[in-house]
């Protein structure tokens, strides 16, 4: 292993792994921290946690445990990945986790850069833009769990850490890696412990990656990862990069599960539902104890052998607010995630071998229910979302049947084109 990565949610981990594969690194994503002594044959390992919205102390403990496993497995550099919209609660967790990792690794300076220009996330003069809009005007200010009401990342990160937070502006980035490294040295000499780094293009991300080659710890969104594989290539440590995305072919029925309520996923659900089978899960019916899961399984089993089906809880922000007000934010989320995960697990036991899951929390619940522990990352479907192949653990009493391999696409809520679901399945069928 060359690069060890810690991601604060499951779909974000997939997004990061996708970037590394595109850079020529054979990459495996694990669900949680592997057992001590586990050997993984890969250039990069991404340990996916569910620590974005957990209490800061829990996020720190999990992230440190992941860091220690990765270092014991040989990782030469650690990358802490969070969302390209810098999602965090008022108490963190980006700053507290970065602080703890810096202490663990004995480093006194690192960067923070969530930019992902390919997905319309850019940082300019320390301000985060989503397309042409400031972060706090992009819809993220209404996020049910991590509302982002300030686009000034220096200010946001400074509120989460006792280390001084500085800025490396775009004019320094465009001057090249040497100029940017010099800026980092100057900030460190002035007593800064972290720096937000501007980035407007993929070229900027490659420059940032080169300037971070010797840093024990790098933090950022998945975009910045496109500049990291080249560092290992230049050191002669990464050579055979031509087959990093190769996966075995998977045949069988296909299922789409969607729990995300983002604008992008709402559009994707709407596009699919216009001409393909789709069933909406009612959270109030779940709360009343009605047999929603059983009804959904009956509906799916009548159709899934003939064509792919979508089962979703995706709703508009207004509908989400009403559900959360009635049931509570955490209770509503857990209710829906558990139901969707139960449906996915039952249908995979029936023989589903292609599964798309939309939404970070939903995807985490689904892979846990499936008993997936790790996934080999393959080709990109849309920016930030690749196909993967996982070996799930068979439950007691299950026969081997067609085998335990399953193709997975874990999509972050905000990612993907409007026709993502159909495009993803067509790509897998053509492989």
Image (cartoon, helix red, strand yellow):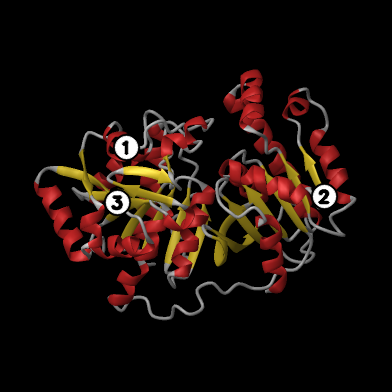
* SS state under label 3: loop
What crowding class fits label 3: few (fewer than 14 Cα within 10 Å), some (14-19), or many (20 or more)?
many
Q: Residue at x 46, y 65 (%)?
A: 39
Q: CA distance from mark 3 to mark 2?
A: 44 Å
Front residue of 370 and 186: 186
* SS state under label 1: loop
* Sooner in the amino-acid sequence: mark 1 or mark 3: 1
Front residue of 213 and 97: 213
Using residue 24 as the reference point, say whether residue 292 is left or right of it. right
Residue tagged 2: 277
Front residue of 37 and 252: 252
* Sooner in the amino-acid sequence: mark 1 or mark 2: 1
Residue tagged 1: 152
Residue 88 percent across, percent down from the top left = 41, 36
Quarter-of-image position of residue 362: top right
Using residue 272 as the reference point, say whether residue 119 is left or right of it. left
Q: Quick one: quadrant of the N terminus?
A: bottom left
* SS state under label 2: loop
Using residue 274 as the reference point, say whether residue 44 is left or right of it. left
Residue tagged 3: 198
Q: Quick one: quadrant of the C terminus?
A: bottom right
* Sooner in the amino-acid sequence: mark 3 or mark 2: 3
Position of residue 70 relative to residue 140, above or below, is below
Residue, far front: 132
Residue, far left: 189
Asked if residue 404 can be seen in this view, the reply is: no
Residue 186 percent across, percent down from the top left = 11, 52
Q: Which mark is residue 200?
A: none
Residue 11 percent across, percent down from the top left = 54, 50
What crowding class fits label 2: few (fewer than 14 Cα within 10 Å), some (14-19), or many (20 or more)?
some
Asked if residue 93 can be seen in this view, the reply is: yes
């Amino acid at each position: 292993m060359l690069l060890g990565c810690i991601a604060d949610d499951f779909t974000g981990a997939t997004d990061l792994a996708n970037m590394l594969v595109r850079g020529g690194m054979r990459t495996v994503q694990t669900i949680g921290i592997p057992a001590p002594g586990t050997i993984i044959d890969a250039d990069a390992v991404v340990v996916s946690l569910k620590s974005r919205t957990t209490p800061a102390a829990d996020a720190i403990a999990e992230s440190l445990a992941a860091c220690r496993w990765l270092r014991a497995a040989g990782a030469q550099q650690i990358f802490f990945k969070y969302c390209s919209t810098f999602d965090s609660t008022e108490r963190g967790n980006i700053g507290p986790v970065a602080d703890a990792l810096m202490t663990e690794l004995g480093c006194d300076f690192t960067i923070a850069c969530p930019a992902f220009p390919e997905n319309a996330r850019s940082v300019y003069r320390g301000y985060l833009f989503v397309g042409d809009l400031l972060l706090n005007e992009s819809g993220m200010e209404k996020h049910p769990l991590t509302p982002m009401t300030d686009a000034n990342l220096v200010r946001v990160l400074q509120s989460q850490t006792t280390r001084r937070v500085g800025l490396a502006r775009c004019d320094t980035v465009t001057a090249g890696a040497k100029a940017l490294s010099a800026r980092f040295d100057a900030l460190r000499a002035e007593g800064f412990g972290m720096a937000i780094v501007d980035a407007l293009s993929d070229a900027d991300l490659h420059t940032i990656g080169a300037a971070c080659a010797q840093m024990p710890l790098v933090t950022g969104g998945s975009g910045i990862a496109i500049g990291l594989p080249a560092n290992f290539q230049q050191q002669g440590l990464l050579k055979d990069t031509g087959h990093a995305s190769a996966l075995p072919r998977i045949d069988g029925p296909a299922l789409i599960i969607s729990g995300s309520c983002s604008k992008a996923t709402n559009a994707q659900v709407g596009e699919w539902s216009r001409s393909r089978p789709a069933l909406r899960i009612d959270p109030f019916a779940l709360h009343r104890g009605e047999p929603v899961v059983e009804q959904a399984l009956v509906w799916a089993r009548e159709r899934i052998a003939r064509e792919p089906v979508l089962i979703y809880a995706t709703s508009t922000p207004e509908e989400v607010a009403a559900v959360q007000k009635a049931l509570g934010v955490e209770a509503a989320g857990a209710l829906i995630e558990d139901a969707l995960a139960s449906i996915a697990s039952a249908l995979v036991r029936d023989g589903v071998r292609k599964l798309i899951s939309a939404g970070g929390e939903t995807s985490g619940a689904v892979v846990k229910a499936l008993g997936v522990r790790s996934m080999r990352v393959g080709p990109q479907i849309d920016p930030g979302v690749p196909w993967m192949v996982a070996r799930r653990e068979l439950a007691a009493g299950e026969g081997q049947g067609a085998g335990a391999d399953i193709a997975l696409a874990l999509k972050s809520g905000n990612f993907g084109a409007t026709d993502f679901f159909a495009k993803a399945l067509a790509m897998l069928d053509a492989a």
